[in-house]
Image (cartoon, rainbow, N blue to C red):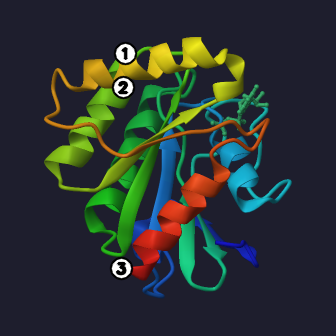
Amino acid sequence: MKIKSAEFIISNTDVSKCPKERLPEYAFIGRSNVGKSSLINMLMSRKDLAKISGKPGKTQLINHFKINENWFLVDLPGYGYAKVSKKKRQKFQSFIEDYFLKREQLVCTFVLVDSRHDPQKIDLEFMQFLGENRIPFCIVFTKADKLGSSKLNKQIVSYKKKLLQTWEEVPTSFITSSSTGFGRDEFLKFVDGVNQD
Ligand code: GDP
């Protein structure tokens, strides 16, 4: 897929105010600082479509972008940032939960995890939530350039092994680097393929 257009549509905290247009939708989520904004910009070949956050946990909104006039990319708030107050965190969780439970055109969620880290409780719990609600998701390993290739492979194998302790199979996964552009073609091919189905 070639990215011909990528246009910001709307930000909000209310799923009922998300675009009414029934286009296939792909959501991006992960812990704050996982590299979500950088990844979105890299995948869309845009310098500042998503804001690279100076402060983790800053973007607390559901952000819709229309891509190539035929699908939505949704940038969701990063989770798990300790400095957001408890009250704010609860509110944030409930509108995100709402988004996942009510957004019928959501085709796939990309759960971003840092290639360097072992599975984190908050990510596993979130995947559990998606699984229990039958919401399809893929795992996107970010910042792959930060590890050498053999260390990277080892880390991914071990991550998947740990997932298999609770999951029957490992979801589709992508290895990416926003610094080098690694993984872009494979990712776009995947979305293209799903959109054609
Ligand atoms: P977000 O909070 O998840 O949106 O994360 P950002 O995209 O703002 O990235 C957090 C930090 O990680 C920034 O300093 C980025 O420059 C850095 N970063 C993000 N992606 C990569 C990557 O693929 N490789 C490297 N080396 N650094 C990255």
The kind of residue on which mark 1 rests is Ser
Looking at marks 2 and 1 on the same chain, the residue that comes earlier in the sequence is marked by: 2
Identify the residue at image location x=83%, y=54%. 48
> Could you tell me the amino acid type at mark 3?
Asp
Which label is found at residue 197?
3
* Rendered view: 122 above or below 12: above
Q: Answer whether residue 119 is visible to the viewer in this image.
A: no
Q: Residues within 10 Å of mark 3 (few under 14, many from 20)?
A: few
- Give the label on residue 87, or none: none
Q: CA distance from mark 1 to mark 3?
A: 32 Å
In-image side of 53 versus 60 (left or right): right
Instruction: Give the percent coordinates (x, y) of residue 51.
Output: 76, 48
Comparing 166 with 155, the one in front is 155
Residue at figure coordinates x 17%, y 20% from the top left: 165
- Foreground disc of the pair 2, 1: 1
Q: Secondary structure at mark 3?
A: loop
Instruction: Using the image, tell me which numbered label, if any, was put on residue 158.
Output: 1
Viewer-side residue, 10 vs 161: 161
Q: CA distance from mark 2 to mark 3?
A: 32 Å
In the rendering, which numbered label is found on residue 122?
2
Tell me the crowding category of disc 1: few under 14, some 14 to 19, or many 20 or more residues within 10 angstroms, Cα based. Answer: some
